[in-house]
Image (spheres, grey):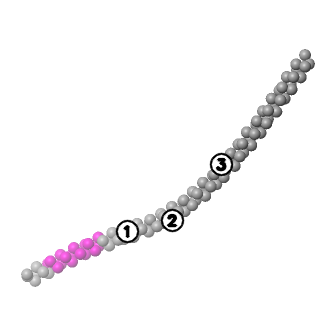
Amino acid sequence: MNLTLLLNKARKELEVASVNAVHHGKIAQAAEQTAKAAKVKFKQTRKLVKFTKKVARKAEDQAEAAFEALEKAQNRLEKLEKHARKQERKHKASKTAVR
């Protein structure tokens, strides 16, 4: 082979290797940035999960308290209705006795 052909071939290989190195370097940089972003997102997701669990527990406690308040209100209403029916019967009985 001719020395010029070997030099041209070596230059082409160098050019291809250079392009590949730049390309792979950019890919590596993008992968590194993606990994960092994923790590940040993972931390944020863990924080969000923790916060969501806290909010869910608080909401559950509030729902339980509201349910207890509802039961108390229902019992009180039933007692008042029963008392009102007794008063109404007494009132009717007293009216019929007067006549």
User: Which label number is shown at residue 31?
Assistant: 1
**Horizontally, is 42 left or right of 24 in the view?**
right
Q: Which residue is mark 3?
A: 63
Between disc 3 and disc 2, whose residue precedes? 2
Quarter placement of the C terminus: top right
Between disc 1 and disc 2, whose residue precedes? 1
The three-letter amino acid code for the residue at tag 1 is Ala
Taking depth in this image into account, of 31 and 71 the one nearest to the observer is: 71
Q: How many marks?
A: 3
Task: Give the crowd class for mark 1: few <14, some 14-19, many >=20 residues within 10 Å.
Answer: few
The three-letter amino acid code for the residue at tag 2 is Lys
Picture quadrant where residue 30 is located = bottom left
Q: Residue at x 77, y 39 (%)?
A: 76
Extent of the magenta region: 8-23
Q: Which residue is mark 2?
A: 43
**Horizontally, is 73 left or right of 63 in the view?**
right
